Image: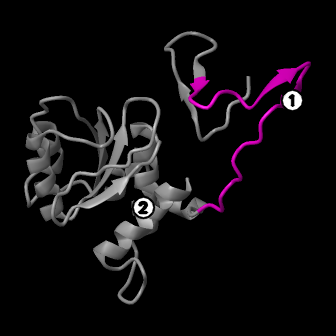
């Protein structure tokens, strides 16, 4: 079975046929030859070059951009995991968070209060869904929050894209389009929209 890379996920821990796709397969292998019955989405020009990827890992150590957490949201969530990931004002070890919501980007009121802390720290927060299908179209309304919709990416995929986006935009200088936070947020959202 051939799956489009954009939609494939591992669905079983040990089964040899462990992969599946929410959009189905795009082809099969017959006698060693690929046979396609669907065309994959046109490949977008990459926003990331190999130097960007290398910058995420410097001599085996993750850069600050790579310190991006996934926080699972659930009904009645306390927000403690998010607050703990954000840390104190003096620590602030992370640049981004992916919230794996239980639906369309919604969070509990306690988690919303923790998101206000993320806004104070200037963190970028991507909202993904752990439902397995569908786009995240609703983002929490928290003043000053650099919120991003991960669209239909899984939380794991959203984390990788957020890390790459943060690394690609980290060296912005005054006068460049990604220097201020609203512009950087817009560039990061464009990455999610394209990939």
- Residue 109 horizontal side relative to residue 124, left or right: left
- Residue 86 horizontal side relative to residue 66, left or right: left
Q: Which mark is residue 189?
A: 2
- Whole-percent x and y of residue 126? 33, 51
- Residue 75 horizontal side relative to residue 57, left or right: left
Magenta span of residues: 20-46
**Rendered residue at 16%/58% (across/down):** 142
In the rendered view of the protein, which quadrant contains the N terminus?
top right
Q: Please name the colour scheme applied to the rendered image.
A: one colour
Residue in front for this viewpoint, 168 or 74: 74
Q: Distance between the residues labelled 2 and 1?
A: 35 Å
The answer to whether residue 173 is above or below residue 79 is below
- Whole-percent x and y of residue 132? 44, 29
Q: Is the magenta stretch mostly helix, strand or loop?
A: loop
Give the crowd class for mark 1: few <14, some 14-19, many >=20 residues within 10 Å: some
- Would residue 183 be counted in the magenta stretch? no
**Rendered residue at 40%/77% (across/down):** 178
Q: Residue 134 carries which label?
A: none
Question: Quadrant of residue 70 in the image?
Answer: top left
Q: Which mark is residue 35?
A: 1
The answer to whether residue 75 is above or below residue 14 is below
- Residue 95 horizontal side relative to residue 165, left or right: left
Give the crowd class for mark 2: few <14, some 14-19, many >=20 residues within 10 Å: many
């Amino acid at each position: 079975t051939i799956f489009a890379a954009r939609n494939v996920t591992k669905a079983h821990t040990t089964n040899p046929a462990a992969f599946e796709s929410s959009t189905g397969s795009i082809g099969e292998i017959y006698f060693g030859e690929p046979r396609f019955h669907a065309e994959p989405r046109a490949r977008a020009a990459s926003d990331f070059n190999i130097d960007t990827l290398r910058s995420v890992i410097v001599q085996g150590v993750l850069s600050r951009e790579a310190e991006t957490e996934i926080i699972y949201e659930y009904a009645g969530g306390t927000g403690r995991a998010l607050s703990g990931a954000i840390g104190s004002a003096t620590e602030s070890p992370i640049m981004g968070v992916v919230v794996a919501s239980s639906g369309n980007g919604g969070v509990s009121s306690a988690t919303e209060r923790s998101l206000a802390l993320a806004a104070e720290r200037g963190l970028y927060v991507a909202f993904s869904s752990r439902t397995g299908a569908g786009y995240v179209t609703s983002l929490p309304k928290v003043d000053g929050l650099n919120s991003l919709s991960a669209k239909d990416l899984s939380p794991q995929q959203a984390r990788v894209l957020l890390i790459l986006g943060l690394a690609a935009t980290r060296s912005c200088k005054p006068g460049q389009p990604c220097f201020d936070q609203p512009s950087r947020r817009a560039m990061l959202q464009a990455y999610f929209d394209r990939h």
